[in-house]
Image (tube, rainbow, N blue to C red):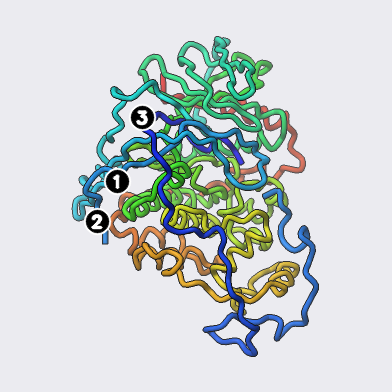
Amino acid sequence: MSTFDNAGVYLQNASSASSTLPHDLSNMSIAHKSPPVSHNASRPFDYRTTYAPVAAPSAVSAVAGDAQSHRPPSKSHSISSVDSLASVSSNAPSTPTHDVDDVCFDMAPIPKPVRNSSDAYHDQIGKRPPSGPLHADAAPAPTPATTKTNTHAAAAVAPAAAPSESMLRNEKHKNAISFRVGNKYKVCEIIGEGAYGVVCSAIHRATGQKVAIKKIQPFEHQMFALRTLRELKLLRFFQECDVSENIISILDIIKPSTYEAFTEVYLVQELMETDLHRVIRTQELSDDHCQYFTYQTLRALKPMHCADVIHRDLKPSNVLLNANCDLKVCDFGLARSVLTADQDTGFMTEYVATRWYRAPEIMLTFKQYTKAIDVWAVGCILAEMHTGRPLFPGRDYHQQLSLILDVLGTPTLEEFQNINSRRSRDYIRTMPLRKRRDFRTLFPKASPEAIDFLQKTLTFDPRNRLTVEECLQHPYLSAYHDPDDEPGAPRLDPDFFYFDMQKESITKEDLRKELWYQVQEFQPLLR
């Protein structure tokens, strides 16, 4: 799991205790009834009455290996955040953990949608809610938190002069870290770190804009280079298509003076104020915020799915927010084209994202991974916003699948037969029978529209899930849905992810040359 899933945080000085969570789903248990004699629609299908029982497959063989009506608020909502992020290695096996020093700022009220007026509607959705009450003048010195990165490209330019070097102290490990970013930016302090990079907050001297700069060392491992290259190419693509309003942008890339000096990549990005993980863990959200955040997340997913791109790592910490309720999706290092995902034999080897938001077909090693993976994650995130807790907080693959079946019930015969892996089918047959949980009981404060949305995004069979466009058209989001303000993107060329299709033969030097090309072509948005 990347630590740079979030752009850094500037917060006011006000302490906030975590709100009481309305629903605890972390210890779900079901009283299993005796297996039914026959199958009908109201009872779980007992595969043991049809198939001979089998021994439970081993932990490794059974499932994939463990790499891992609108009512606007009448007043501002207090949303908690934190000012630090724990260092989490990209190999971290399970739960997202954060060092928490809770502080508070006021999040702007959700704007009331204006129907029948495209200009006014775009001002509120496309242009975002009015400027928020983050009173910087009255706040203490800003306290940044985390950052994430991605990248872009456009037309070749001459090599830059050798950048000057700034040294920052890493408070966790007490070692000095160099940032060779020149005089264009004033480097402030380290705000995050991970397995192959460190992030600092900075100020663009010419404009005074606060930014996040991520220093990446992608050439230590081929996987790091692949992830960096994916982000560079994808974010460039979405920015050039002008569909990145809800997707994190690349503002600048520090260009090395020579190819020989090209040992690091410096990405300059927007500095967002917090992420959805921090907001959920510190305060109960209103249904209005749940609707608006879900809508913006889907608005980010639409161009991805139109382009046949699967994000594959949607989770609250990859959903960035600011005090005005602006939302941007980040972390495209695991993204894939639908075409390459089908033939990517290393899919699960590199897929080390938090398992709590993984669709059941990933754990059951379906032979085809579709855009429905992202829709499942949207459902999980909405459920978490409503309850304050992750819906499926599994410790490992086996418990993850068990928690999913605790809620959805034992798969129907049709769902069971659509599992392509025989080992996975055998594993499912060894599990206790479960009845489907009533979503109205799981989410007692959710509206009927929200319940219906959750039921249609959290389906066991990916073919029965809503698509992103169907989600946007769902009554739960009718207050914000405007097909004229939800841009798509053209389909990617089949060769866009050529390096993923050639992963077995491509070398680190090949990837370095491609990254050099992408960096040199990028045209900065900050001059």
Give the label, 1 or 2, closer to the camera.
2
Please name the amino acid that badge 2 sits on. Answer: Arg
Where is residue 172 shown, x and y percent of the image? 61, 25
The local crowd at label 1, few if under 14, some if 14 to 19, many if 20 or more residues have their Cα within 10 Å, is: many
370 over 427 or under it: above or below: above
Q: Residue at x 61, y 58 (%)?
A: 369
Please name the amino acid that badge 1 sits on. Answer: Ile
Q: On the image, numbered disc 2 is attached to which residue? A: 71
Q: Residue at x 79, y 75 (%)?
A: 54
Alpha carbon of mark 1 to alpha carbon of mark 3: how far? Answer: 26 Å
104 over 392 or under it: above or below: above
**Secondary structure at numbered mark 3:** loop
Q: Residue at x 26, y 35 (%)?
A: 131
**Secondary structure at numbered mark 2:** loop
Residue 205 position by quadrant: top left
Marks 1,2: beta carbons within 8 A: no
Q: On the image, numbered disc 3 is attached to which residue? A: 12
The local crowd at label 2, few if under 14, some if 14 to 19, many if 20 or more residues have their Cα within 10 Å, is: few
Alpha carbon of mark 3 to alpha carbon of mark 2: how far? Answer: 28 Å
